[in-house]
Image (cartoon, grey):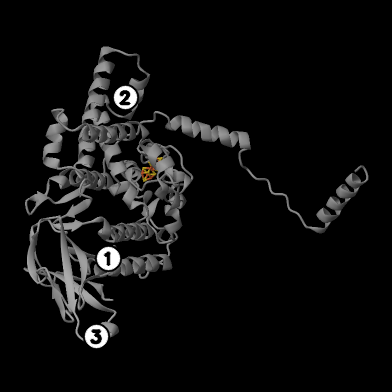
Amino acid sequence: MNMSQPRQAEDTIVKAERIPTTFIEVDKPSVTEASQLERNVKDKRKNRHFQLQKGLYQRWRTTINALVIMVFLLLPFVKYQGQQAILFDLSQQQFRFFGVTLWPQDFTLMAWVFIIAAFLLFLATVIWGRVWCGYLCPQTSFCFSFVWVEQQIEGNRNKRHALDKAPWTLNKLIKRIAKHSIWGLMSLVTGCGFIAYFVPATSLYMDIFTLNASGLVTAWVWFFAVCTYLNAGFMREKMCLHCCPYARFQSAMFDSNTITVTYDTKRGESRGPRKRKQPTSLGDCVDCNLCVDVCPTGIDIRNGLQYECINCGACVDACNQTMIKFGYQPNLIGYFSENKLLGKRSGGVKSWKFVGYAAGVLAMVLVFTLDAFSKTDIELNVLRDRQHLYREVSEYRIENTYTLVIRNKTQQDKQYFIYLDKENGLEINRDINVEVVVKAGELLIYPVTLFHTRSGNEMDKLKRMSVMFNVTNVDEPRDSVAQQSQFFTL
Ligand code: SF4
Ligand code: SF4
């Protein structure tokens, strides 16, 4: 042991002498400084209020957010053919969508819809970055609407911070009660909005607010209401930062043509305060910090692209306001692609990622279309009698029994024609060429017995034959299903 230590040291020196080494002074915080910085950022974010900004992008965002919330709340009230147009009827295990009823066996269609939506989101991300997060995500819409209520009652960002620190007075109590009451009401309406997709919407709101809803429905409404209240009132950006998986992997879809909210460092630096119209050698950033004050996730976009940025454009509007005040060109912070900032040409086929996602969307839309067109509104199952393969009624007469299970998958009563395709000399003891009425969404259990009468030595030759059962909609003959089964003899 003692011998090996000097030898090891010697080896190290020899290796070091052979490898040319340049020592670089790295100006980075030590581990303790870095964790202290991180702690400071977290402390700043704790109970942090942001200022609602006005401007072009915020007008777009609020309009789109309002539309998202309105569509979400009003869609369950839309009627189609006298029924709720969109309804996940869990008790009947069916999903109704504008006259189309999907049963559990049709859920591949739903799966395709979700897969197409996901790929469209990826495609949109390649082009416009996190446009979904900033403009369309319900999380953003609800959080901004809660903050809007807060700002109307408690005032701007500074007043809200001051109110947090102020001692409890009657004024503070009234403001807090008003804010939380409105938040509570908004949350309860949102909870009803969710559940209205699962139970008839027209009676739900009245039942909830008059305490006449069933225990189960009430529990679910309150569950979603409490989630909304905690999420939009308190969690807010923490959901985007710590819970949303999309925030973590969206940068994998970015390329140099992706448009994201970016600070033009070349133009802005070196930053520094100055008076209006004062000649200066500084960059255009006047270090007013407005872009940070209005940021819902509390980041400083001047530090570069960060996963916390939801592309909401609030900092763009805030900075443009400052640029106009100082007489500078707008868009020091703007929606830019990396190529645009570098002065490179962008356009045409954007990138292979873009081509790949676009091809994926097209392929999946094609598969979905084929799947949708092959869907029928009748479901047929032919069940053979499992206990008796056949029954010998007389020496030359054999019978097989079947049960036809026919489901009408539509929301209207339908008249169906049941018939056998190839009769092969079979007799039918029950009317099989018959019309039956199956009620909307219901199952018809229809037992059928087939006979075969044989002559001479046919008995030895014939062991089994195929039979094809058909069910056709009388009013729409294209709506038809068939299922093959077997007829067994001795
Ligand atoms: S950096 Fe700008 S665009 Fe990104 S989240 Fe903050 S305010 Fe919105
Ligand atoms: S708003 Fe614009 S000028 Fe003000 S600190 Fe941010 S980047 Fe600089």
Marks 1 and 2, how far apart at CA: 83 Å
Q: Amino acid at mark 3?
A: Glu
Give me the residue at 24% from left, 68% from top: 369
In front of the other: 25 or 233: 233
**Residue 293, image x, y percentages:** 37, 35
Q: Could you say whether the residue bearing mark 3 is in a helix, strand or loop?
A: helix
- Marks 1/3: CA distance? 22 Å
Indicate the secondary structure of the residue bearing disc 2.
Answer: helix
Query: Is residue 421 visible in this depiction of the protein?
Result: yes
Q: Which mark is residue 458?
A: 3
Residues at marks 1 and 3 touching, judged by CB atoms closer than 8 Å: no
Callout 1 secondary element:
loop
The residue to which callout 2 is attached is 159
Q: Which residue is mark 1?
A: 388
Q: Nearer the viewer, residue 278 or 77?
A: 77
Find residue 25 and report its horizontal and vertical position in percent.
68, 45
Q: Mark 3 to mark 2: distance in Å?
A: 98 Å
Q: Nearer the viewer, residue 23 or 47?
A: 47
Quadrant in which residue 366 is drawn = bottom left
Residue 310: % across, % down: 37, 46
Crowding at dot 2, Cα within 10 Å, few <14 / some 14-19 / many 20+, comes out as few
